[in-house]
Image (cartoon, helix red, strand yellow):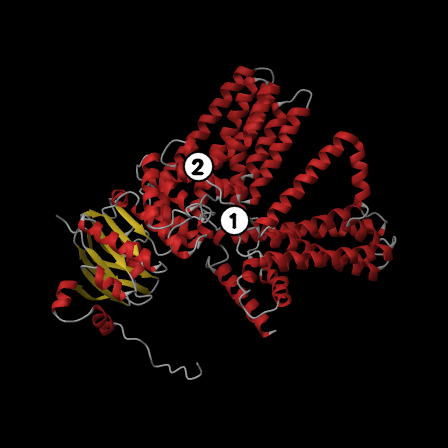
Amino acid sequence: MPPAIETRGLMRKYGRLIAVHDLNLQVNAGAIFGFLGPNGSGKSTTVKMLTSLLRPTAGEILINGLDMRTHALEVKQMIGVLPEDLGLFDYLSIWEHLMMIGPIYGLSHQETARRAEQLLRFLDVWQTRHTLAHQASYGMKKKCSLGMALLHNPRILFLDEPFEGIDPVSARHIKDLLLRLSAHGVTVFLTSHILEVVEKLVHGFAIIVRGEMVSHYEVAELAASGLTLEDVFFRHVNPNTDAELEWLG
Amino acid sequence: MAGIVAILRGQWISYWRKVKRPGNLTAGHQGALLLVGGLILFKYVQLLRLSALDLSNGRTTRAELLLSAVFLIWMFPLVGDPQFGVVRRSTHLPFPFLRLYFIRLLSPFVTARSWVILISSAGMFYWLLYASQPAAGLTAIILFVAFSYLCGLAAADLIATAAGRRVLIVLLVVMLVGATAAFALTGQGLMLMMRRVWLFLPPHLVGKTLVGEQAVRNLAIMAGYAVAAWALSIRVTKSSLMAGPVSGPRARLGFFLSILPGKFVGLIAKDFRHFQRLPDLYFSVLVVIAAAFYLITAPEPEVEVLWPFLILYFLSNVLASFNFFGADDASGFDRYMLMPLTGRMIILSKNLAYLLLVAVQAAPIVCLAAWRMGLALAFLSLIEAAGMMFCYLAWGNWLSIARPRRLRFFRFSSEGPLVDLLLGIAFGSLPGVLGVVLAARNGDSLSSLIWQMILMLIASLMIYLASLLRFGRSLEQRHESIRTALS
C-alpha cells in the first residue's frame, strides 16, 4: 500500500527566494501528521503544493500513489482542504458554501443538505448558518471552510492552522473528530503553531525552518527519548530575544 | 498633520506599487491606452477652443455640455476607487472625525487619474480669455469643480453602505417614476419643465457667468451649491464611517439551488449574486428598458431598430463577460482550484452564469418581440442575441485568463485593458452587426434570412467551443498568475 502522502525532492522558488527546498516526506494512511515551523518557514507553501494550489518548481508529489501532475482531478476528489486563507466567497452564507460544494463532489442535493446540517451542528455554527462570509467572525469562517473540507468524506485531509481562531470547545470537538477520522483510516496533514495541541494529537511530525526540513519524528519515538515536542521545536527554532525594548512598559 | 501625511504617504506607496506591478509600460497595452487618452484630450482641447469662441459670441450651449461632461467625469475616479476603505480602516487611530474627513478629501488624489481630471478641469480656465468678466468666471469655474468633486465624493461614500445604496435606488426609482408620470400627464410639458430646471443647474450658471449675465446672482447660487455639496459630503462620510463594515442582505440561494440541475448550480448562483453587486451591469438594464419602451410604443417595430438595442445590451454588459474571475478575489479563486473540476468545467460554469444573467435581463425583450413582431422575428432576435453572446463569451474566456483584474462590489470599474476591451466589443458585436446588415438586405425574404442567421449562429458557436477548449487548458496552466492578479 503506497503512502498517503509522499514528496520527493520537492522545491518551490519565488524568484530568487527558495521557499521550500528538497522536501522528502512520507505520511502513512490513517496517520495524523503535524507539519511545524515558525512564520514564513514554508509550511503553507508546502500545503499549497500538496493541494495543487501551487506548482512545484521541482520534485514530485504522490497522493495515494497518484502523481499530482498527471492525476490532479482524481487527487482533488479524494482530498479535503482547509486552506490558509479559507477560500470563501464574501457574499455566500455559511450554509450556501456547503450547499454549493456538495454537488461538485457528486453528492445529491438532499445528501448535501443532510451532511451540511450535521456538520454545521457539530461545528456549532448551525444557528448562524445564514450569515454571509464577509459578515462572519474569523472562527465562523474557519468552521465553514472546515465543513467544506469534510463534506465529501475525503480520504486525506490537509488542514492549515485548523485551531487558530477557534473557541476551546470547538477545538476540542475538532480534535476528537480528527482522532476518530484517523481511526477510520483517514490521513490528516496539519500545520499549527499550538505545540501542546499538536503533541497530543499527531502520530508524527516534521519541522521546517527557512524552507528546509530540519527534523522528522514519530511521537512514540519522541516519548521514548524523554523529550517533548517543545524541546525539539526550540532546538531548531531559536527565539530572537536580542532586542531589549527598554522603552516598553 | 504628521499622521495625515503618513497615511497619505502609505496610500501613495501602495498605489504606486500596484501601478508598477505589471513591470513595464507595454504590459496591458499601456502605450495604446496613453494614445487613446491623448486622442480624448486632443478632442477635449478642440472643444474647449470651440466653446471659447462660442462664449465670446455670447453662446453658452457648447460650454454647458462640456461642463456637464466634466461633472460626470469627476464621478468616475471617486465612485470607482476603493479609497473609502482606507479611511474606514483608519477609524481606530486617534483622529477626530474632521481629520478623517480631511484624509478622505485628499485620498482620491493619490491616484494619477484624479490628477489628470483635475488638470483637464483646469483647462476650462482657457475660457477666461474670452469671458466678459474673467474674475467672476474664474470663481464660477473653481466653485463648479469643487461642487463636482464633492458630489462625487458624497456619491462614492453613499454607495459604500447598504443603507446608502437603498437611498440611492429609491431616489432613482422615484425620479424615473416621476419622469414617466410627468411625461404621461404633460407630454411636451415635461421638456419645458426640464428646460426651466436646467436654468438653475450649475453648468448653465457657470456658462451665463462666463458671458457676464447676472454674474453676482449666479455666483451666489453656485456658492450655495458648493456649500450644500460640502455639507452633504461631510454628512454622508460621517454616517458611512459610523455604519461599520460594508454589509449586504442575508440572501439565500435556495431558490436557484432548488430549480437548477447539475453540479455547477451553486457556482452559477454564486456568480449571479456577484453580478447583482456590480453597478456597471445596471447600464444593461437601462438598455433593456429602452428596448422594451420602443417595442411597446412603436406603431410597427422593426428588427433593424431592435437589434442595435441588443448590440448595445451586450456592450453594456461587457464587465460580466470579459472578467469572469474579477469578483471572486484570490481566496475565492483558490477555492475553484481546490475543486475537482477541469479548467474547461470552471470556465463553463462561469459562462453558464453569464447565460443566466442574459436570459433574465433580456427575456422581456424576446417576449415583447414575440408579442409585437411575431414568433419568427422573435426567434431571429434570439439567434441574433445568441450569436453575439457566443462571441462575447469566446473573447471573455481569453481575456479573463490573460488579463484578469479585481472587481470591487458596489464600485464602478473604471480600470481595465481598454484596447482589449474595445477589440472584444468589436469582435462580440460582429454577429449583431452582421444580423442587422442581413436583415436590411433580405427585406421580405424571411426564410433566407433565417438560414443565414442560423449559419451565423453555428459559426459563433464553433468559435465559442474552440475558446472553451483552448482557454480551459490555459486556466490550469496559468492559475498562479491569475491568483496574483486578483490579490
Location of mark 2 (residue): B254
Q: Of residues B114 and B364, which is closer to you in this image?
A: B364
Res B363 → quadrant: top right
Quadrant for the N terminus of chain B in the image: bottom right
Mark 2 closeness class: few <14, some 14–19, many ≥20 residues within 10 Å: few
What's the residue type where badge 2 is placed? Gly
Q: Of residues B233 and B396, which is closer to you in this image?
A: B233
* B405 relative to A19, above or below: above
Q: Report whether residue A52 is seen.
A: no
Q: Which residue is at 18% across, 59% downward? A: A203
Q: Is residue B359 left or right of residue A205?
A: right
Q: Which residue is at 40% across, 33% downward? A: B465
Q: Secondary structure at mark 1?
A: loop
Q: Of residues B466 and A242, which is closer to you in this image?
A: A242
Chain letter belonging to callout 2: B
* B427 relative to B112, above or below: above
Residue B352 in picture, x, y percent from top left: 43, 35
Chain letter belonging to callout 1: B
Quadrant for the C terminus of chain B in the image: bottom left
Residue A16 in picture, x, y percent from top left: 33, 65
Residue A6 in picture, x, y percent from top left: 19, 54
- Per the model, the C-alpha gap separating discs 2 and 1 is 36 Å
Q: Is residue A63 left or right of residue B136?
A: left
Callouts 2 and 1 on one subunit: yes
Q: Which mark is residue B417?
A: 1
Q: Of residues B429 and B96, which is closer to you in this image?
A: B96
What's the residue type where badge 1 is placed? Pro
Q: Is residue B306 left or right of residue B321?
A: right
Q: Is residue B234 left or right of residue B28?
A: right
Res A77 → quadrant: top left
Question: Which dot, 2 or 1, sits closer to the camera?
Answer: 2
Give the mark nearer the N terminus: 2 vs 1. 2
